[in-house]
Image (cartoon, coloured by chain):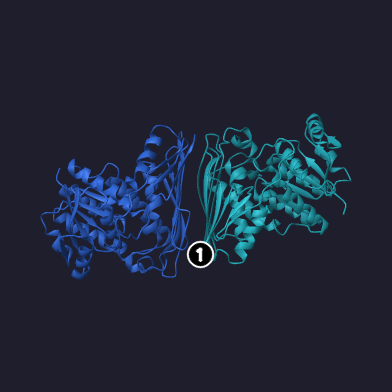
Chain colours: A cyan, B blue
Amino acid sequence: MAPTRWGFVSAGRISNEFKIALDTLPQDEHQVVAVAARSLESAQKFAKTHDIPRAYGSYAELAAQDDIDAVYIGSIHTQHAPVTTMMLQAGKPVLCEKPMAVNSREARQMIGLAKEKGIFFMEGVWSRFFPVYLKAREIMDSGGIGDVKLVTACFGFPKGEEPRMKERSQAGGSLLDLGFYPIQFANFVFKGEEPEDVTVSGHLTNEEVDETVSIILKYSGNRMATLVCCMSSLLANEAYVYGTKGTLKIPSFWSPQELVAPDKTHKFPLPPPGKPINYFNATGFRFEAMEVRRCLQEGLKESPLMTHAMSLQIAGILDRARKVVGVVYDQDKE
Amino acid sequence: MAPTRWGFVSAGRISNEFKIALDTLPQDEHQVVAVAARSLESAQKFAKTHDIPRAYGSYAELAAQDDIDAVYIGSIHTQHAPVTTMMLQAGKPVLCEKPMAVNSREARQMIGLAKEKGIFFMEGVWSRFFPVYLKAREIMDSGGIGDVKLVTACFGFPKGEEPRMKERSQAGGSLLDLGFYPIQFANFVFKGEEPEDVTVSGHLTNEEVDETVSIILKYSGNRMATLVCCMSSLLANEAYVYGTKGTLKIPSFWSPQELVAPDKTHKFPLPPPGKPINYFNATGFRFEAMEVRRCLQEGLKESPLMTHAMSLQIAGILDRARKVVGVVYDQDKE
């Protein structure tokens, strides 16, 4: 099989991680052929660090290349909608970092375009493809914890002073960056089911973005999820799935190496990174990349593990939560 | 100093625990002089097991004794208000098991009566007096975790099939029995402060009592608590206090022996029970008993660690939560 030839949008921190994760996979399966940034200089610097053949100073140049099988979009999330649109218009399959959009409206448009064009598109919910998640699914589906009754997950880091977290003009706040993870976890456990009820409470920073938010989701059949995100404190960052017969605990559930199940603790160690990384367990991006390659090879337009409907469901909850806590972005006004 | 002479209301499981905990304290400080139950037979049986001099087949007989310094009320919670009222009317200081009442109205009446009579009254929130809580208070007050931003606590046991949990006529459901604990924990951390906002979601069993409930409390100064109780699954049953500079983790926070603080894990082992116990860490009731004795000796009418106002604040949240999930007891209709 031919290698999947990746083009990178953005030469920032997250692109760095994704590249280092790709480097843990066979080179005849994944290659990065080009990187584009808003400045040619930073694209060239990134290309040099990572031995990428071509560097561009605009995303449009990348979109024009005809030897790219998949575009990885690692830009700031306010750019996800316009850049994804550009790439889909150019016929490129897209893996777009989470959150795929600033709100549901953007998400619907992006997914609508992908469907219209018949092009593969996936939101980069990397957590979803870790072996821990696959094992958890297997245990839940086989009744290993009885009937699932409750999910709890919290995610918080003291990131409130980072400009992209702090500023409303950058669609800052804790929900889109951090809250996304517990929400996607509930979405994972309940297989994308739409909650019957979404209850939210939270508060804003002085800059009027959300600092701490709690979300209670009620699902059919008396099942619930209680989720928290916070950008002022480091939280325990664990997820639990409570069943009538047992519990699954996933430490570091956004990029886990371990699943504490009733029978035993299942361990799935990650490969070490070949270069310095910025984020915890970043080589775990490899699983998401493997899924993209699999989908492209099989001609799928979306991943069954992270469907368009799931992305829209998560975006909808984020919208509702932001509305309750009172955060309005410019994008929401359009 | 003379020993504190206790009279017990109820010869049930919780009275058993309280007696065994008293037995871990010096006998010249705590003595149980009488036990009353609804049946003389069970009072006598309890008295025999625990070497208690006198047994009565009615609570009124106990109320009439003049050698009792404090009454411990360990009956089912629907009986707390009438029995506490009887004992206060008879001039007896009262330690009443949690929840002190089925609703705020009852709680206000009970506390009103204690104040009117000028008699010591305390709700038996045993957790509050464990050394772990005192140490946590010390660390929080000295800034050891920076500014407190978020409390999380969950409490759940699969008790849904127990008649007293299951039946609405017995004021069953998870909130009063289990939810009380995370709520009292938030009340402890935030020193009885009234939340600015109480947000609740939950669902009912077929018998129309609350099975799982999540409560989000918003406090002044951008501080929050996210609490969960559940009677269908065993939860992690841990409490966290997240500050801007560190975290306190309290495993088994309803009766803890351990406090995980930023500097180290503080351990406060409990004395072993002298007889078989029903509940986890039950000898920890000793701390609550010590507090009652201290308050009586100092002539206090309420404990500064578990004030009447704190009891009313907790009862108010329980009322609001039950109302949202739609549980109405007969007592609420009066």
* Location of the N terminus of chain A (image quadrant): bottom right
Of helix, strand and loop, which one carries label 1? loop
Q: Position of residue B41 (x, y in %)?
A: 20, 70
**In-front residue for pair A59/A20:** A20
Residue B230 occupies quadrant: bottom left
Q: Position of residue B54 (x, y in %)?
A: 15, 62
Dot 1 falls on which chain? Answer: A
Query: Residue at the spot x=46%, y=37% of the render?
Result: B264
Amino acid of disc 1: Thr
**In-front residue for pair B198/B164:** B164
Residue under pointer 1: A244
Q: Position of residue B73 (x, y in %)?
A: 24, 57
* Location of the C terminus of chain A (image quadrant): top right
**In-front residue for pair B5/A77:** B5
**How many numbered markers are drawn?**
1
Q: Residues within 10 Å of mark 1 (few under 14, many from 20)?
A: some
Q: Position of residue B266 (x, y in %)?
A: 41, 40
Q: Is residue A49 visible to us here?
A: yes
Q: Is residue A212 left or right of residue A302?
A: left
